[in-house]
Amino acid sequence: MSLPYAPPVPPTDRFAVELPGPSLLPAHVTRSAHGGWWADDPGTVRALLVHCGPERLLHGDPARLDPAVLARYGRGQFHAPERFLPLLGRTFTHLTPWVRVLHVHAERPRPVSRHTAAWVRPLGAADEAHLDRFARRSTTAGRTAGPHWTAETWGSHRALAASGFAWGAFLGPYLASLVCGYLVGHEHLDLAVATDPAFRRLDLALACVHAATAAAHARGLTPTWSAPRSNHASRALAEAAGFRPVRQELVHWAGPALTG
């Protein structure tokens, strides 16, 4: 369900220190003007839900959050303390846990050839059509066509293209590989990476990550990388790009909401 954009997230002690991972979500909502938040009392926050794309961040006292309110934000992945699990279980038909590994850019990346690096450039507003085509080529059978998953936290291909936080490798007219800021905080840039299946194993994703990490450092942002623990290909690419794991996080995919 698409809900109206809310004003910037009300300040709480929970978000006073920005760490790699879901704590970037409040800053990203403000930056992207996509998503929003729900609070039991915006003046004195005792329960807070921040949402953007498929991401949901819960904070505070679960007793202050009614299941009927929470149900509006279903079919997403929840970052929440363990105390919220009974509430999530009462609200949704399915609650699937999975572990993701959070990485931080810490070492010199494996180099790519200058020829490959030359195919990479920042995306701009005029690249919306390239993202549309990239999404169509990446859509698997049986999946409803729509924005590519890398654009879900920006709301549209147009917003992602114009964000200033996307880099692509172009082979002729094709956007072959894409790296973007999935979540952009005040101090961190969490990257999302995708490559057209027809152009894999050409070091294009690694070349895009080189460009993205260099731009992030130039802006005073620390690049981060989040990957499911079971996604060995993503974690291998992160290692090649100079990222190192710093911690693991338990995430719960929830939905749809119970009815009646």
Image (cartoon, grey):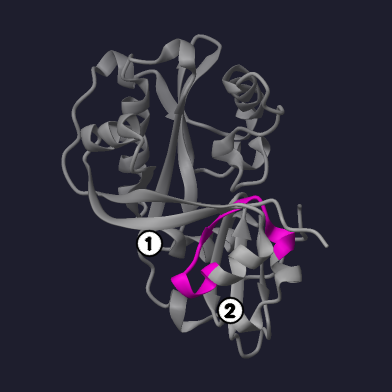
Looking at the rendered structure, the kind of residue marked 2 is Pro
- Identify residue for label 2: 62
- Please report the residue visible at 53 percent of the width from the left and 68 percent of the height from the top: 85
Q: Is residue 167 above or below residue 184?
A: above
Quadrant occupied by the C terminus: bottom right
Q: Is residue 196 left or right of residue 229?
A: right
- Among the 4 quarters of the image, the one containing residue 240: top left
Looking at the rendered structure, the kind of residue marked 1 is Glu
- Which disc number belongs to residue 187? 1
Residue 58 lies, in percent from the top left, at 55, 69
- Among the 4 quarters of the image, the one containing residue 117: top left
- Quick check: is 126 in the magenta stretch? no
Residue 259 lies, in percent from the top left, at 80, 59
Residue extending farthest right: 260
- Quick check: is 80 in the magenta stretch? yes
Front-most of residues 12 and 164: 12
- Please report the residue visible at 65 percent of the width from the left and 35 percent of the height from the top: 157
Q: Is residue 147 above or below residue 118?
A: below
| Mark 2, other Cα within 10 Å: few <14 / some 14–19 / many ≥20 | some
Secondary element under disc 1, as helix, strand or loop, is loop
Secondary element under disc 2, as helix, strand or loop, is helix
Nearer the camera: disc 2 or disc 1: 2
- Among the 4 quarters of the image, the one containing residue 236: top left
Residue 169 lies, in percent from the top left, at 43, 22
Which span is picked out in magenta?
A: 71-85
Front-most of residues 230 and 146: 230
The mark that comes first in sequence, 2 or 1, is: 2
- Please report the residue visible at 38 percent of the width from the left and 50 percent of the height from the top: 99
Decide if residue 10 is in sight here: no
Decide if residue 60 is in sight here: yes
